[in-house]
Each structure stands twice: as structure tokens, then as C-alpha cells.
């Protein structure tokens, strides 16, 4: 193979690597640290950029990381044992703890309540074909949020107001 052709092939591979920077999804930020999912695992990086550090490498896919209010814990969705369930782990990485056992009802991790409960969307308590918000505390006690068809939610600073959307994956929720 001519040397010029080899150099051209190497240059095109390097160029392709530089332009394909990845597909980073579901970011969460606490202080100056960003957690996100990519390649089926969770990662973290400083808000200023730099080299990302892999937090998980378990079989299965991890997604939707959300920092706890104090930034010490990350709640996320994973399918380690079949259907998606919620797990938590230290924000610095470590052994995950399974928090839900709903057998496929969990849809997403919405966030945390100001007092440290995980807020998540589930189909397990909905009488309608749709989602419902629930919270789970440190002792794995689940409490339903009394809103029908609430699929996403976030507490305002101070914790007295819950902003939510009905109907999961509704394209118009940002303008309403």
C-alpha cells in the first residue's frame, strides 16, 4: 500500500474521532459537577469541561442521573435485573443500591424532594394508561404524589411548590 494512502487513511480516522465527540444524554448538575449518561453508563465531569470519569460499568444500561439536594448521592434508572428500576450510589461512584422493585412500572427519575426523597414517575399506581409521580424515602417507603397523570416534576427552591407536567413525552409541555 502506498505510503500516501496509509497517511491519508490515518488522517481521516483521526479526523473522524475528533468530530465524533459522543452522544451525552440526561445531564444533571450540582455545584460544579455534571453527571450524564453515555455509552450505557454514567459519567461525571466538571462544569468547565475536561476529561469525564466513568462512574458505572455494570452490565445493563444506566441513565437519568439526578443529584440529591446535598450532592452526595445520585439516583438513576438501570436495567440490571430486567426491567428499569431506580438505584442510588454515592456521587463519587461506588456500589449501587436498588431502591424500587416495581417490575417494569418505573418510567423515569424526576428528581429529589427538598427533604431527600427520590421523586420518580411510575405506571404502578396509575389506573389510567399513563404515569403518576411517587416518592421513595431512605427506608424505601413509597408515597404517591396526589396528582393524576403527572409524568415529570420538579420542586421549586424552598420545597413548597411542585411544578409538573401531565402526560409523558408531550411535545408541547415547554410552552405550557
Image (cartoon, rainbow, N blue to C red):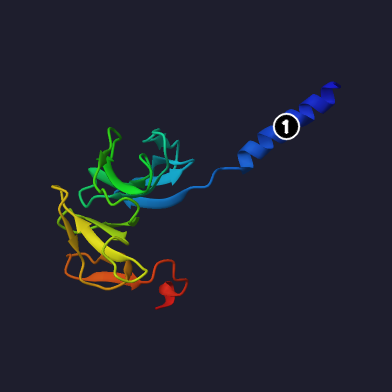
Residue that appears at 24% across and 67% down: 156
* Above-or-below relation of 105 to 45: below
Image-quadrant location for residue 123: bottom left
Is residue 47 among what the camera can see? no
Q: Seen in the image, is 175 located left or right of residue 68?
A: right
**Which secondary structure, mark 1?**
helix
Residue that appears at 18% across and 65% down: 159
Q: Which residue is mark 1?
A: 11
Quadrant the N terminus occupies: top right
Image-quadrant location for residue 52: top left
Q: Seen in the image, is 1 located left or right of residue 106?
A: right
Q: Seen in the image, is 140 located left or right of residue 172?
A: left
Callout 1 environment at 10 Å: few (<14), some (14 to 19), or many (20+)? Answer: few
Query: Which residue occupies the extreme right position in the image?
Result: 2
Residue 25: where, in percent of width, then height?
46, 50
Residue that appears at 54% across and 44% down: 22
Residue 150: where, in percent of width, then height?
31, 70
Is residue 143 among what the camera can see? yes
* Above-or-below relation of 163 to 45: below
Residue 158: where, in percent of width, then height?
17, 65
Q: Seen in the image, is 69 located left or right of residue 13?
A: left
Residue 112: where, in percent of width, then height?
24, 56
Count of marks placed on residues: 1
Quadrant the C terminus occupies: bottom left
Amino acid at each position: 500500500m502506498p505510503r500516501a494512502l496509509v497517511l491519508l487513511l490515518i488522517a481521516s480516522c483521526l479526523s473522524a474521532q475528533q468530530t465524533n465527540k459522543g452522544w451525552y444524554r440526561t445531564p444533571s448538575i450540582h455545584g460544579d459537577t455534571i453527571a450524564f449518561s453515555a455509552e450505557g453508563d454514567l459519567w461525571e465531569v466538571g462544569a468547565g469541561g475536561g476529561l469525564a470519569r466513568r462512574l458505572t460499568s455494570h452490565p445493563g444500561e444506566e441513565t437519568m442521573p439526578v443529584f440529591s439536594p446535598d450532592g452526595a448521592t445520585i439516583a438513576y434508572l438501570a436495567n440490571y435485573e430486567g426491567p428499569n428500576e431506580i438505584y442510588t450510589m454515592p456521587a463519587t461512584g461506588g456500589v449501587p443500591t436498588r431502591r424500587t422493585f416495581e417490575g417494569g412500572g418505573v418510567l423515569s427519575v424526576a428528581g429529589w424532594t427538598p427533604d431527600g426523597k427520590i421523586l420518580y414517575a411510575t405506571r404502578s399506581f396509575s389506573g389510567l394508561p399513563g404515569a403518576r409521580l411517587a416518592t421513595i424515602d431512605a427506608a424505601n417507603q413509597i408515597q404517591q404524589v396526589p396528582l393524576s397523570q403527572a409524568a415529570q416534576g420538579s420542586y421549586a427552591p424552598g420545597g413548597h411548590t411542585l411544578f409538573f407536567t401531565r402526560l409523558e413525552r408531550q411535545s408541547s409541555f415547554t410552552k405550557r
